[in-house]
Image: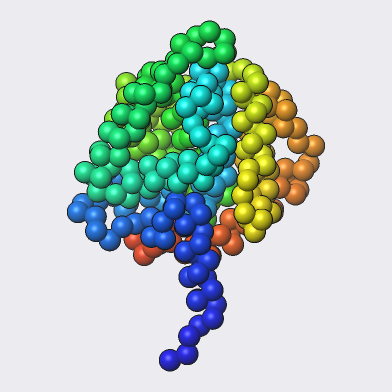
Amino acid sequence: MAVDPTAALRGEIQRRMRRLVTGDDAPPVATERTDDGLFGPDSASWIVHADPSMFVGGLRALLLQTLHPLAMAGVAEHSDYRHDPLGRLHRTAGFVGTTTYGSTADAEAMITRIRRIHDRVKGTAPDGRAYEANDPHLLEWVHLTEVDSFLRAHQRYGITPLPDDLCDRYVAEMGEVAHRLGVPEPADSVRELKKRMHAYRPEMEANRQTFDTVRFLMVPPLPLTVRPSYGVIAAAAIGLLPSFVRRMLWLPMAPGVEPLVVRPAATALMRTLGWVMEAPPEIAEARDRLRAG
């Protein structure tokens, strides 16, 4: 039987992409799961987190997180992202992948591990305030930026945008993870998510640590082969930020550039990555059910 060169090429690109992002060749749905995990194949989380738009949402979340001085101090003083940027990416992807697609036991073990790591992340920010990574207020800020960013990116660039009721379900599902991490009463709807995000606005400010991190995020030390794609993803992430955030981060965007240039380029890239990555059968079936229902 003749080998399809296109399929072989796609398979090799899939392996390289997964290795770059997660440090592992395996697809997000593990065959050795003992149960459906925290959410299961009919969840909104399974669809959102398997979509290439997560690249855009993840970078947007990181940009937003730099604007809370205490959260930013924890990253700047306890993270080795400058010397090992892919290591942090792998750990983040591993957490999202395990809590979404792993068994319940694996998800709970991962959450326990992260809480123990957070126990060691504490110190004093440049403005003199003390911080702790397990502070529920800071945990909620990080949680809100991620959920808001993942959902916004998916709704703009996702292969299968979610209807309103599944958007609320996604927020509620992510609230389950946040609660297990230490957030007392996470948002359980898009409306509540926006309300909670707005409440943090008085605490947002840009300092030296913010700008140092933003510069790194805009031009990280990535392999030459992925830099053009990363540039498109970065532009898409900036385009999804509120205008006041772009001003605070010194990331201006000329009028008309986002809808006329960035959005078409990012949409094309997401569709290409969607074809390249090819979702596992369980996720493809979940998307089909969403389209049908």
Say which residue appears at 30% left-offset and 39% top-offset.
110
Q: Position of residue 69 (x, y in %)?
A: 55, 18
User: How many marks on residues?
Assistant: 0
Say which residue appears at 67% left-offset and 42% top-offset.
219
Q: Position of residue 234 (x, y in %)?
A: 65, 43
Q: Is residue 293 above or below residue 169?
A: below
Q: Position of residue 176 (x, y in %)?
A: 31, 33
Viewer-proximal residue, 35 or 135?
Answer: 135
Picture quarter containing residue 174? top left
Q: From the viewer's perspective, is 216 left or right of 162?
A: right
Q: Is residue 239 above or below residue 271?
A: above
Q: Residue furthest front?
A: 83
Q: Is residue 1 above or below residue 136?
A: below
Check the image and tell me how it is coloured: rainbow
Q: Residue furthest bottom?
A: 1
Viewer-proximal residue, 123 or 157?
Answer: 123
Q: Quadrant of the N terminus?
A: bottom left
Q: Is residue 148 above or below residue 16?
A: above
Q: Is residue 266 visible?
A: no
Say which residue appears at 31% left-offset and 53% top-offset.
41
Say which residue appears at 34% left-offset and 33% top-offset.
114
Picture quarter containing residue 205? top right
Q: Is residue 22 visible?
A: yes
Q: From the viewer's perspective, is 249 left or right of 104?
A: right
